[in-house]
Amino acid sequence: MILTGPEITAAAHDGRLRITPFAADQVNPNSYNVRLGPTLITYTGPVLDAHRPNPTQETTVGPDGHVLQPGELYLGHTLEEVGSDTFVPLLFGRSSVGRLGLFVEITAPIGDIGFHGQWTLMLTPIRPLRVYAGMKIGQIMFFVSTGAVDLYRGKYQAATGPQPSAYWRDLARLQVVAS
C-alpha cells in the first residue's frame, strides 16, 4: 500500500514519518515534493575507484542557479530531512524535471526503514541545465511494509548535504568479518 497525500500529512504530524521542514503545499495526491539543497559535489579524479575514497569538489548553488553539464555526475541533496521507522520511502525525479532532460536518482530510489537525513541525489543532465537551490526536484512516496523491521544503521545515517560513495567502507567491513 502507498500512502495518500492526506495520510502523509497525518503521519508527518503524528511522528510516523519525519519531513523537516514540512510544507503542506508540497503534498501531492500520493507523494511529497522534495527540493534541491544548496550544495553540489562532483568527483575530480579522472577514474573513480570503488575500493577507495574519491576526491570531490563542492559547489554552492547561488541565487542565479548553477548550470549542470552533460557527461558529469553531480551529487546534490534534498533540502528536507526525510525518514521513517515505519514506512519504506521511494524517491523519484519529478516529471517536470525529467522533461528538462535531468535524470534524478535513477539507480537508487529506495530508502531503508530507519534512515533519517537529507537524501543524496544523483543528478545527470542530457544537455546544459540551470538548476536552483529550493527548486522542487523530486517526490518521495511512502509504502507500508509487512513483517519484522530491522532499522537502517548504515554508513549514510543522519546525512547532511550530498554524500559521495562510501562503497569502500563495505569492503573494509567484509575484510574484518572474513578474518
Image (tube, rainbow, N blue to C red):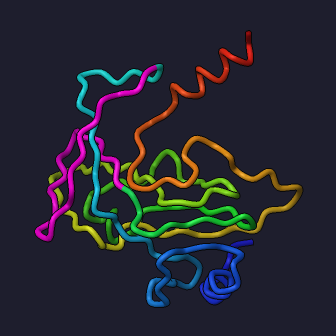
Give me the residue at 63% from left, 56% from top.
115
Q: Is residue 46 above or below residue 97?
A: above
Percent coordinates x, y for residue 127 in the rendering: 18, 51
Between residue 134 and residue 15, name the one nearer to us: 15
In which quadrant will I find the N terminus?
bottom right
Give me the residue at 55% from left, 67% from top.
82
Name the residue furthest left. Answer: 64
Q: Which residues are magenta?
A: 52-76
Quick check: is 117 in the magenta stretch?
no
Q: Is residue 97 above or below residue 69?
A: below
Name the residue furthest top. Answer: 179
In the picture, residue 130 is in which quadrant?
Answer: bottom left
Percent coordinates x, y for residue 149 in the rendering: 82, 55
In the picture, residue 57 is in which quadrant?
Answer: top left
In which quadrant will I find the C terminus?
top right
In the picture, residue 154 is in which quadrant?
Answer: top right
Give me the residue at 39% from left, 21% from top.
49
Percent coordinates x, y for residue 55 in the rendering: 30, 30
Report the side of 55 relative to 23 (left or right). Answer: left
Percent coordinates x, y for residue 108 in the rendering: 52, 47
Report the side of 17 relative to 56 (left or right). Answer: right
